[in-house]
Amino acid sequence: MSSNVLHNPIHLSTTRTHPQFRLKKPGRIRAGGGGSSSRAAAPRVLVAGGGIGGLVLALAAKRKGLDVVVFEKDLSAVRGEGQYRGPIQIQSNALAALEAIDMDVAEEVIAAGCITGNRLNGLVDGLSGSWYVKFDTFTPAAERGLPVTRVISRMTLQQILARAVGSDIILNESNVVDFVDNGQKVIARLDNGKCYEGDVLVGADGIRSKVRTNLFGPTEAEYSGYTCYTGIADFIPADIATVGYRVFLGSKQYFVSSDVGGGKMQW
């Protein structure tokens, strides 16, 4: 199998050397029948980053029988330690995709989430509060037999995904800083000097991705012109039973208010 990095068949020069590389090679899978012969190991997928995207991809690859390794530099956020991270909205189509990957995981996510898709959601005037547009996310989902849109804590979502992927697959304090693609295998190097060989390397390591930088070269992030402040308030609006979230529109600014369950609102 030829290697691929970020779905890109770009190969680095074979003259590039890293004498400090010490490969961690995948094990062999014994063939059935009790004989001594063996067949090639399953294709190995290396995932840089244990965020939501990296964990979902790892779970999908694992369910397909692939050999998966996830490198995450800091699992404290996944464990619920340190700074609290706010909720994330999961639309019906995303929940359906998760069902296709792992029904048990999808059901756990659905059970832990706060349903907003069965209430009014949309854009309102920032001064008067009158509705500009109401989003009906319930009817399209119901017509197609899809789960209704929910909001869930990012930490809760990551914890569910991490448990399903498995602690034996996720390597903590492992930060991918470089890689070499020789056309047959890709070798990922960590900041601690350890190296791992695989068939595919996926860069899911965020906005400052080392994989992307090494593949395409350094680029600076461009400021969008927007600054966002967010928080969680212990507050239950009078219309909580009928309104899921509202976006209050103003001049070059807006304010979002969303029910996130448990008597809390995200703003």
Image: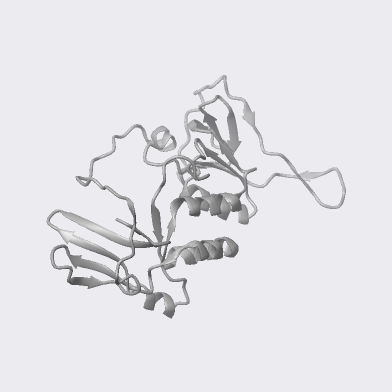
Q: Height in image: 238 above or below 250?
A: below
Q: Position of residue 66 (x, y in %)?
A: 63, 50
Camera-side residue of 161 and 220: 161
Q: Pick the quarter of the image with the C terminus.
A: bottom left
Residue at 18% from the left image edge and 71% from the top image edge: 132
Q: Position of residue 116 (x, y in %)?
A: 38, 68
The answer to whether residue 57 shows anywhere in this view is no
Whether residue 25 sits left or right of residue 130 in the image: it is right
Which quadrant of the figure contains the N terminus?
A: top right
Using the image, determine if residue 259 lies above or below residue 156. below
Side of 127 relative to 235 (left or right): left
**Res 40 → quadrant:** top right
Residue 39 x/y as whole percent: 75, 46
Farthest-out residue, right: 34
The residue under the point 20% across, 56% down is 254
From where the camera sits, is residue 84 visible?
yes
Q: Residue at x 22, y 66 (%)?
A: 123
**Residue depicted at x 37% and y 78%:** 139
Q: Nearer the viewer, residue 77 or 72?
A: 77
| 88 vs 1, nearest the viewer | 88
Q: How many marks?
A: 0
What is the residue that sits farthest to the top in this orientation?
19
Q: Position of residue 86 (x, y in %)?
A: 39, 51
User: What's the coloring here?
Assistant: one colour
Which quarter of the picture shows residue 27?
top right
Using the image, determine if residue 11 lies above or below residue 104.
above
